[in-house]
Image (spheres, helix red, strand yellow):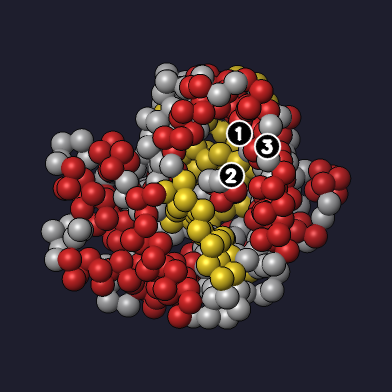
Amino acid sequence: MAGKSERLIWSVGAGGATVGDFHQELTKYAEITVRVGLNLQKGQTLFITAPLEAVEYVRVVTREAYVVGAKHVHVEWHDEQLDLLKYLHAPEEAFSEFPKWRVQQGEQLVEAGAALLSIYASDPDLLQAADPKRVATDQKTRLTAMAKMREAIQNMRISWLIVSIPTKAWAAKIFPQLTEKQQIDKLWEYIFKTTRVDLDDPVAEWKKHIVELQKRAAFLNEHNFRKLHYQAPGTDLTIEFPEGHIWISAESTNAQGTMFVPNMPTEEVFTLPKRDGVNGVVTSTMPLHYNGVLVENLSLTFENGRIVEFSADRGYEAIQGLVETDEGSHYLGEVALVPHDSPISNLHTLFFNTLFDENAACHLAIGSAYPVCLKGGSEMDEDTLRQHDVNQSVEHVDFMIGSKDLQIDGQTVKGEWMPIFRNGNWA
């Protein structure tokens, strides 16, 4: 799941349309953000983290939030060029320290039941010149310090949402053949299309989409598969599931009983694997953007759940830093099914952004599992989760393994095998 609790912790017309048309679609985007994704409630606080280029969208979201009854809207602006400067010039000890006031801020937001909106639109090539060890140390320090907030997010105790807006660097990476204005326009067009903003009633369309994903999750839960077997070029992998695992889809429920949609766009149904129940080899089918570095042609070998070997044509050191973050980052925490024939995949575009790329293909996640994917899991402490074979880590990083060549079979509790995916799509 774009999941990505670490992103939440820190994380002029489009498509040739007139300015008026663009503003109308931007307003619709803000409406589904506030009313469907966050499902913001009267009297609730909204906390937004956003890049500087998102100012217009943030203003429209803020207005919409107050219209539905928000009490406060707080915005934390982010300039990733400042991150790069830190990695290049800060003293070594800076990456092992984290300010207590930021920890307190996160914990206060959780206590207040605030809704969190993260606008994720990073430059895929930003940290090519940075020392991967510095980046990995900084990431581990930050995620470890924000453990309580991360736990609240992964247990869906508070409402949270990840969305994207075009930025110059990101759009240029996707559409290098276009002019700068065309790049931004094209990316807005794709964002509006994949989030259903281009339709007449996006709120209604999202409700329909949620129902369809829930049907897929219900099918998987009814059959209660013991394991899945994946086969594709470079992939021969078996994943077992713990007793009591649950497949969930687009919609989640927070501690107050409010429904929300954590990712927009979203096309996945997902669950957690049995910690020591993953065996075989899996190869990525898309580049992974991790900590400002592109990782290409990633291959992982598992024995009894643990990553025992890995390789990558590009970004090897970044993956090494990820896997060696802690003990839990040597294991998987998420299994997600996404058909190859999906709105994002059918754009035939590599987004260099996990929020979009993971919703174009089946994927797995290295690191922590979402306890809500286990019956009673959100109420369990760390020791109890460990007893139920639920992986725990400060990391949670998705990588894509789906393609038109992927075949998946599921084994039922009776030991019978049945097709789940054929040629990359639901059987």
Q: Which residue is mark 2?
A: 6
Q: From this view, report whether residue 222 is shown above or below residue 166.
A: below
Q: Earlier in the sequence, mark 1 or mark 3?
A: 3
Q: The C terminus appears in which quarter of the rendering?
A: bottom left
Q: Which mark's residue is nearer the viewer, 2 or 3?
A: 3
Counting from the top left corner in percent of width and height, residue 16 is at: 13, 59
User: Label 1, label 3: how many angstroms apart (C-alpha)?
Assistant: 10 Å
Residue 98 has which mark? 3
Disc 1 vs disc 2: Cβ atoms closer than 8 Å? yes
From the viewer's perspective, tell me whether residue 74 is left or right of residue 394: left
Q: Position of residue 418 (x, y in %)?
A: 55, 51
Q: Relative to 374, say whether 212 is above or below.
A: below
Determine whether the residue tagged by mark 1 lies in a helix, strand or loop.
Answer: helix
The residue drawn where x is 73% and y is 29% is 327
What secondary structure is marked by label 2?
helix
Q: Tell me where residue 194 sits by quadrant.
A: bottom left
Relative side of 303 to 290, left or right: right
Q: Is residue 17 above or below residue 279?
A: below
Q: Which residue is mark 1?
A: 139
Q: Position of residue 176 (x, y in %)?
A: 20, 35
Q: Quadrant of residue 156?
A: bottom right
Residue at left 48%, top 77%?
Answer: 66
